[in-house]
């Protein structure tokens, strides 16, 4: 049994203009100690998916159908109290997007980490303080800094403090939403090493949400390419990168510089992401796809197996692969 299994998950927001189909039929599995990278443009539903896994949804959001199975238990069917008690922080924790701004400026950082512990457990105050010190030490922050305020922390230290907070109750799954955004490359490297060491030491599974293809290639065993609320390609990272089959994945890779290759012009994916209230019919990528045919605008493609560990949702992936092989 997979640690996390998501089956046919759909979550829509209700607005005055209509329903926003932010998460629209997502399937994937995550094993213990595995890293899944989710890549896609802004607005494709990555952060909405993260919120849905934890059932941290605003009033206008609703799971339409599907399952989120954590060790066999369906989180979607749980009451809010049970999710709060048995799932959040204990089994799945989130390092949210913009985590550097997530600390409260009027409370000491250590007190905010301890609150995550005392809210969910009845651990004595002395043990809580000891746990906070251990967590700060784990993320390479001097435990004495727990007595300071967030404005005294650098950007990288704030990010590490938020990671420490997310690890307060030893969750089995850590969702890291854009963990390296707005950090310089040296600090980014430190955060990456930290996440990998957490995975190695505690066998923590990680869902890495990012725009950074290089980061996913470095960290993840599996990669999901998300577009307009759907996974258009999903599989082992090696296969998705080396044998990309979906035109959107190919476009992302061609827009990414490879320092190992000679200098070349990069090609951007044309157009803009669609409106998720009224997404295109058929394949949602077809208005931007250079290979699109009439079937693409008429029929929503069903995911097909490229291999046992690689699936793609595209009517033309075999034709595109043969065409590109011929050109090469």
Image (spheres, helix red, strand yellow):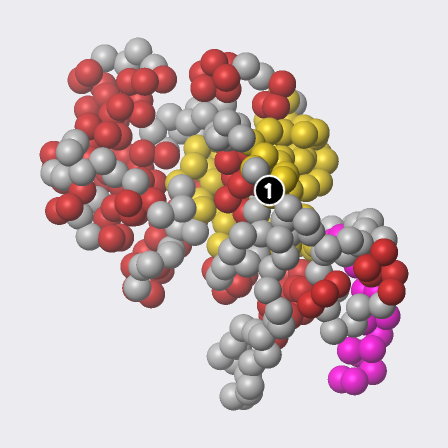
Q: Which residues are magenta?
A: 310-328
Quarter of the image for the C terminus: give it.
bottom right
Question: In the picture shown, does residue 225 fall above or below 250?
Answer: above
* Residue depicted at x 70% and y 29%: 65
Query: Is residue 266 in view?
Result: yes
In the rendered view, tell whether residue 275 sits above or below residue 128.
below
Residue 85 percent coordinates (x, y): 45, 16
Residue 64 falls in image quadrant: top right
Residue placed at 59% from the left, 79% from the top?
A: 267
Residue at 57% across / 47% down in the picture?
45
Which residue is disc 1 drawn over?
A: 17
State left or right for residue 310 relative to residue 176.
right
Q: Is residue 132 visible?
A: no
Q: Is residue 322 magenta?
A: yes
* Number of numbered callouts drawn: 1
> Which percent across, then down, holds residue 217?
54, 61
């Amino acid at each position: 049994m997979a640690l996390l299994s998501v089956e046919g998950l759909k979550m829509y927001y209700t607005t005055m203009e209509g329903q926003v189909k932010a998460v629209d039929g997502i399937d994937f599995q995550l094993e213990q100690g595995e890293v899944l990278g989710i890549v896609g443009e802004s607005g494709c539903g990555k952060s909405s998916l993260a919120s849905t896994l934890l059932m941290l949804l605003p009033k206008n959001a609703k799971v339409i159908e599907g399952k989120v199975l954590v060790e066999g238990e369906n989180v979607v069917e749980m009451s809010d109290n049970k999710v709060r008690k048995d799932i959040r922080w204990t089994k799945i924790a989130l390092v949210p997007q913009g985590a550097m701004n997530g600390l409260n400026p009027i409370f000491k950082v250590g007190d905010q980490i301890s609150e995550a512990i005392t809210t969910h457990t009845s651990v004595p105050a002395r043990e809580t303080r000891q746990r906070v010190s251990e967590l700060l030490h784990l993320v390479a922050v001097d435990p004495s800094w727990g007595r300071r305020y967030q404005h005294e922390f650098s950007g990288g230290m704030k990010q590490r403090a938020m990671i420490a907070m997310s690890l307060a109750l030893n969750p089995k799954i850590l969702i890291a939403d854009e963990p390296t955004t707005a950090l310089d490359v040296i600090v980014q490297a430190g955060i990456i090493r930290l996440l990998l060491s957490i995975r190695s030491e505690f066998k923590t599974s990680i869902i890495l949400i990012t725009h950074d293809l290089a980061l996913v290639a470095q960290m993840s065993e599996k990669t999901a390419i998300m577009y307009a609320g759907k996974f258009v390609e999903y599989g082992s990272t090696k296969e998705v990168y080396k044998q990309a089959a979906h035109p959107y994945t190919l476009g992302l890779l061609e827009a990414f510089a490879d320092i190992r290759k000679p200098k070349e012009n990069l090609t951007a994916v044309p157009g803009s992401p669609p409106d998720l209230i009224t997404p295109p019919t058929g394949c949602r990528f077809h208005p931007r796809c250079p290979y699109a045919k009439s079937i693409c605008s008429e029929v929503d493609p069903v995911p097909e197996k490229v291999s046992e560990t690689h699936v793609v949702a595209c009517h033309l992936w075999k034709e595109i692969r043969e065409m590109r092989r011929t050109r090469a």
